[in-house]
Image: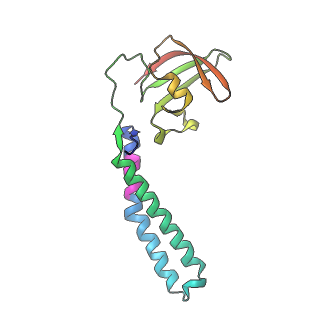
């Protein structure tokens, strides 16, 4: 059974746009590069041809990956439960109890995770630890570097 891919509406649109771009623009561009490279003569020693074929293989692989992701996509829906409880799709403000720093995270599916943008996966140690937590709750979350102690200050959806 295929693994379910959790996506926000925004993430779904990004994947659909990338897939459309690869199919309608990049495929054509690479096919043209291959055609031009063939015109240079002997393809067995033609680096342009080889590069274009490699790029074509990469694009086709990416198209297959994106198609598979869309087939297994499940949209993250607005949660109907307690608005102060962390769910996938929640924006969470936490305070680190050790250094008193405040951090904002958005809990997303692993496909959309981007720690540099404070978008953490529901499968990451911090994401898992925050799921189900509520405003005011203090948590100790096991992370590779030890234990992260936080207090949930705010949850938004």
Total marks shown come to: 0
Depicted 50 relative to depicted 117: above or below: below
Q: Residue at x 59, y 82 (%)?
A: 46
Q: Toward which corner of the image does residue 40 lie, by quadrant?
A: bottom right
| Residue 17 within the magenta-colored segment of the rendering | yes
- Extreme residue in the front direction: 1
Please give left or right for residue 23 compared with residue 138 in the image. left
Q: Which residues are magenta?
A: 13-20
Depicted 32 relative to depicted 79: above or below: below
Where is residue 11? Give x, y as percent: 41, 42
| Residue 152 within the magenta-colored segment of the rendering | no
Q: Toward which corner of the image does residue 8 lie, by quadrant?
A: top left
Q: Residue at x 44, y 65 (%)?
A: 26
- Extreme residue in the bottom direction: 41
Viewer-closest of 68 and 96: 68
For the N terminus, the quadrant is top left
Where is residue 44? Give x, y as percent: 57, 84
Where is residue 151? Give x, y as percent: 56, 14
Colouring scheme applied when the structure was drawn: rainbow
Depicted 136 relative to depicted 6: above or below: above
Depicted 145 relative to depicted 26: above or below: above
Q: Toward which corner of the image does residue 21 lie, by quadrant?
A: bottom left
Where is residue 117? Give x, y as percent: 55, 36
Q: Main secondary structure of the magenta part?
A: helix
- Extreme residue in the left direction: 80
Q: Residue at x 38, y 45 (%)?
A: 2
For the C terminus, the quadrant is top left
């Amino acid at each position: 059974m295929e693994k379910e891919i959790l996506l926000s509406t925004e993430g779904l649109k990004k994947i659909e746009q990338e897939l459309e771009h690869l199919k309608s623009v990049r495929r054509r561009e690479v096919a043209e590069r291959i055609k031009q490279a063939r015109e240079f003569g002997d393809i067995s020693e033609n680096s342009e041809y080889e590069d274009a074929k490699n790029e074509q293989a990469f694009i086709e692989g990416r198209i297959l990956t994106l198609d598979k992701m869309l087939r297994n996509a499940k949209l993250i829906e607005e949660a109907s439960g307690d608005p102060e409880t962390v769910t996938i799709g929640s924006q969470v403000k936490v305070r680190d109890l050790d250094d008193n720093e405040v951090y904002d995270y958005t809990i997303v599916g692993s496909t959309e995770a981007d720690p540099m943008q404070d978008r953490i996966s529901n499968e990451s140690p911090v994401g898992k630890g925050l799921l189900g937590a509520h405003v005011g709750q203090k948590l100790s979350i096991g992370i590779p570097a030890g234990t992260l102690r936080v207090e949930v200050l705010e949850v938004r959806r």
